[in-house]
Amino acid sequence: MRIASPGEGSRAHGDSATTLAPVPPELVAALAEACGTVAARASDRLSSAHDASHYLLTPLAVVAPNGAGEVAAVLAVAARERVPVTFRSGGTSLSGQAGTAGVLIDTRRNFRRIEVLDSGERVRTGPGATVRSVNARLARYGRKLGPDPASEIACTIGGVIANNSSGMACGITANTYRTLESAVLVLPSGTLLDTGAIDADQRLQAAEPDLYAGLERLRDRVRADPVSVATIRRLYSIKNTMGYGLNSFLDHDPPVRILEHLVVGSEGTLAFVAEATFRTVPVRSAVATGLLFFPDLAAATKALPSLVAAGFATIELLDAASLRVAQRDPDATEELRGLSVEDHAALLVEFQEDSQEALRAKAERALELFAGLGLIGPADLSTDPVRRAQLWHIRKGLYTAVAGNRPSGTTALLEDIAVPVERLYDTCSQLIRLFELHGYEESVIFGHAKDGNIHFMLNERFDRPDELARYEAFTEDMVALVLAHGGTLKAEHGTGRIMAPFVRRQYGDELYAVMREVKALVDPGGLLSPGVLLNEDPDAHVSDLKTTPTVEEEVDRCVECGYCEPVCPSRDLTTTPRERIVLRREIARARAAGDVVLLRELQQQYEYDAVETCAVDGMCQTACPVLINTGDLVRRLRADDTSRAEQAGWKTVAKHWDATSRIGGIALSVAKSVPGALPAFATTIGRALLGDETVPQYSGTLPGGGQRRKRLDAQAPEAVYFSSCTTTMFGPESGAGVSESFLRLCERAGVELATPDDIPSLCCGTPWKSKGLTEGYAEMKGRVVASLRRATLDGALPVVSDASSCTEGLHILLKAAGEPAIRVIDAVAFVDEMVLPRLPAGEKVRSLALHPTCSSTRLGVNPALSRVAAAAADEVIVPDDWGCCAFAGDRGMLHPELTASATAPESRELDEVGASAYASLNRTCELGMTRATGQPYRHVLEVLDDVTSI
């Protein structure tokens, strides 16, 4: 067994000594000729060494090819240099498939193309597109992908194919293997093969005659052996992702089809999938969900056959330990909180039907069935979205509850197995006994009971020999248990490194030999991910294990799942939230090892890559299963780097914010009145002298300054209007701006407003908080709280802000000040609720391209935003690729490259839209989107004001 370190093999001497293995310069040079993007810095290598698994291998280099041709060229270099290659996309796999000590190929960045075909009946996509993004494009056609993995927010099509993904509802009938129609493959030899071509089989035979003949030979060998056929039929009658998909030899005759389906579930060890075409499945919109409580596990599993026969699309099991953990969640249902859990178990069931009529019929029959199941308490099926979300939160929140509360320094392991449904009870019961035997406390069992597929969680330390020995012993017992029940050791998560040593035990010598020959035929040089899926080393599953040093609160809770990465605005420029966190771990590891060379290099690279180019937008928290906001970490690091003079200076600014904000606006107006090259040149010189983090870059797309904010009095105000100071610094794109539009809309609806008496001097505090300027933030917080107490009559009136980031900033400020009684509402939500019903109808614009913001997403305002936009436009277009623009106050001026990178996908999509108007709900985001698209973005309330002014 072996614990991974950042770079075995490097033992340099003197001042240059470092624990990170060196990279051969000739390899980097050769890769650079083959591929335009090659990263080999310490931070690039170490950040990419981490994925969602508990393995850690540090690559020599990370390359991001642009197209299948560059992938083939990289493979040729790797073969010539005798360096192994691994493909990595989302990095969400749990079994160790996405790590390498060789060359890591990033297949996410440049392979995200999605093309919907035949009105959604089929879809063609690159391996870098996430399941969620593909389904978003299919949704308008009432279709979706068959595989429905829980990691759909971040897992990509490449990983879905590599692991033969399934999920909660698709079973083995609509998984990747069954719904893949064709693929474009790059073989280790460099051969490019489109399996969707009419003559694909002939092309394979011509290009790879030995491979073609070998596949025919193996097909006939498997079919001629009754024992092999029976074993394959048995193992693939349940979910099974162990080893290669040998059912391909029984299900398909032409070698090209056999190869195509062997690639499914091959975990990147046979070929690169450059493109895939899927047959899709319908979205069933009539849905009802219920949670059934049983006295014990035996009763729950005994009910499965009748529930399956009733037609439930999903049946999710929760054991007693799961229920006890779920009870601690404040959002748990009243029924769950009131249950005195002993040996209880529960089944979360859901119907998914095409029509309400079909749903009602099934629900009525199901209620009759429930009466005979011996349930604890009453059972019902709910169609209410809020209730359904609460029920699913119980199931999906288990991972958060267990992983998020694990002891610091431990690793959360999420494992999965499958057995025939009739053996599920015995398997679960014996598995619980194994938890007790090996001392694993609070290990929960949950999963897809309909398929006999369960997941279980362990918290383990790999830096302690005794606990590592415990894990080895448990694994051996678990393997014996599952195989004794005729099950499979990996149902959904793929074989990876974790189960590679046990493939022979599951399949037997003959079928294992067939798998080895498959690998030798397709990849004779062993180029692709050696050691993954097949491994002769009996200790491979306990080698290269990842340890998690205690670092800091935000870092320690991270499970490195990668769910945060698709929503991060800096993901294609520098680092993602996961990478920011794992680099903190690597910095701590280098410091503990006394590796001053590596420590210095990582710290220097971290400053720009992780701190300066973080938008601190909090979008990562919306996707994180353990609710980490990496922006909190970055804000704290910025505070640590701020000098006493800076803290004092910005505190003074907070005391004189009225004058400061007006000076900023005047400066922009002056800059706008002179030739654009002059202020641009001046800021360029200033940035060169004082640094990019100090002097913003002027751009001709910036507007002139705005107006000082108005004070308003009212006899009977319905709300307190907290207008954003961004309207003082940045003038409107056209017209009078959002403040005047909001006031006019309220006036038309007969809604009276007042403002704080000192509104020109107030701010939500975000400029200070985002920069880590704690003293200035404290000063502004005190001023705002005192003012809002007066203006709202101690919380009797709500506060309304006209910029979503300011709304969120006020929420955060008041929470930090311990003022929950003062309620803050975004102006869009206020108009949706209080103003829109009272407005006259107007002549709408034809189409409106709408940009939600990170703040509106975190605040839950987006549904109201869509309704307000729909009142102003006949067609509202929210780009599928919308995301945080990363303008982030002044971040987009300090680092324009950040906003350019963040908005590039949305901008490309909008190029094809041609909308009549463009809108958002935050002034700085409007600036960022105007710069990115060349289109005039305004606040959505300005558009609504225009169309209702007649």
Image (cartoon, rainbow, N blue to C red):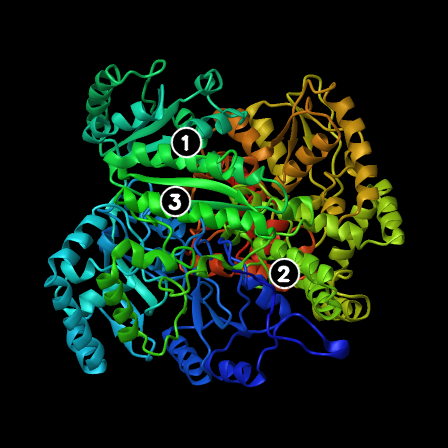
In the image, is 788 to the left or to the right of 616? right
Whole-number angstrom distance, CA of label 1 to CA of label 2: 46 Å
Q: Where is residue 355 in the image (x, y as percent from the top left)?
A: 22, 31
Whole-number angstrom distance, CA of label 1 to CA of label 3: 28 Å
Mark 1 element type: helix
Count numbered badges in the picture: 3
Which of the two labelled residues, at mark 2 and mark 3, occupies the earlier sequence position?
A: 3
- Of 561 and 298, nearer the camera is 298
Q: Find out whether the residues at labels 2 and 3 contact each other: C-beta distance under 8 Å.
A: no
Q: Nearer the viewer, mark 1 or mark 2?
A: 1
Residue topped by disc 2: 701
Q: Which residue is drawn at 77% across and 59% down?
A: 670
Position above or below: 83 against 375: below
Mark 2 element type: loop
Which of the two labelled residues, at mark 1 and mark 2, occupies the earlier sequence position?
A: 1
Q: Find out whether the residues at labels 1 and 3 contact each other: C-beta distance under 8 Å.
A: no
Q: Can see residue 839?
A: no
Q: Which residue is drawn at 48% across and 54% down?
A: 53
Q: Nearer the viewer, mark 2 or mark 3?
A: 3
Q: Position of residue 752 (x, y in %)?
A: 64, 23
Q: What residue type is labelled 2?
A: Thr
Q: Where is residue 820 in the image (x, y as percent from the top left)?
A: 68, 24
Residue topped by disc 1: 392
Position above or below: 903 against 343: below
Mark 3 element type: helix
In the image, is 824 to the left or to the right of 281? right
Residue topped by disc 3: 478
Q: What residue type is labelled 3?
A: Met
- The quarter of the picture where residue 262 lies is bottom left
Position above or below: 799 against 924: above
Q: Which amino acid does label 1 sit on?
A: Trp
In the image, is 529 to the left or to the right of 592? left
